[in-house]
Amino acid sequence: WGQRHSLKIDHLKPNTLYCKVLRMNNLDVFSGPDFSAARRLLFRDSYTIETPQQVIRWWEKRRLAFNVAVGACGLFSLTAMGIANAIFRGEFFAGPPPLAIIAYGVLANILYTTGWFSELLLRPVFGRHTGTVGATLFRYGLAFSVGLTLLPAVLSVVGVFARLVGTLM
C-alpha cells in the first residue's frame, strides 16, 4: 500500500488526451510531507477499479473544499466590486442581487455533482484509470469555477483602471 504504481502509458500516442491525463497524474509533483494535503485533495492514486459508492464518496469528501474555495473567491469578487463602486460613488456596477448569488452557489453544486456522474459514465472508456480521469475532472472543474467566480473582480479592476485612464486623458 503506499507504493506508487507505474502506469503503462508508453504504448499510447503522446498527444492524445488520454495519454496526457494519465501522464499528468503519474507525475510526483506533490510528493513529500509538505504537500500531502494538496496532493490528497487534487490527485487520486486509483489504479484499481472502485465501486460507484467509493467514487461518489471521493467526490463528496471534496465538496466542502470546493465550496470554500468558490465562496472565498466570490467574497473577494464582491469586495472588489464594492470598492470599485465606492471609488466612483455608485456610478459603477453595484453587484448582483442576493438571489443571484444563491442561485450561483446552487448551480455550482449541481455542476459539481456532474463531475462524479461523468466519472461513472466514463468507466467503460478508461477502465482502471477512471479514478485518474475523475481527479483531472475535479482539478479542471475547480480551476474553471474559481476563475469564473473571480471574473467580476478582474472586470472591476479593469473598469477602475479604464475609468482612471479616461479621466487623465
Image (spheres, rainbow, N blue to C red):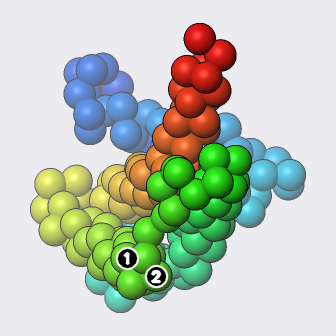
Residue 144: where, in percent of width, then height?
42, 50
**Discs 1, 2 touching: Cβ within 8 Å:** yes
User: In the rendered view of the protein, which quadrant contains the N terminus?
Assistant: bottom right
Indicate left or right for 113 with 63 as reference: left
Q: Amino acid at mark 1?
A: Ala
Which residue in the rendered view is the most extreme toward the bottom? Answer: 53
Residue 110: where, in percent of width, then height?
30, 78
The residue located at (51%, 62%) in the rendering is 94
Residue 22 got which mark? none
Q: Amino acid at mark 2?
A: Pro
Q: Quick one: 37 or 46, which is closer to the camera? A: 37
Residue 24: where, in percent of width, then height?
47, 36
- SS for callout 1: helix
Q: Are there few (<14), some (14-19), or many (20+) residues within 10 Å of tag 1?
A: few
Indicate left or right for 88 with 49 as reference: right
Q: CA distance from mark 1 to mark 2?
A: 5 Å
* Residue at the disc numbered 2: 98
Indicate left or right for 158 with 105 as reference: right
Question: Is residue 45 at least partly visible in the picture?
Answer: no
Indicate left or right for 102 with 165 as reference: left
Q: Quick one: 54 or 149, which is closer to the camera? A: 149
* Residue at the disc numbered 1: 100
The residue located at (22%, 53%) in the rendering is 126
Residue 5: where, in percent of width, then height?
53, 49
Which residue in the rendered view is the most extreme toward the right? Answer: 34
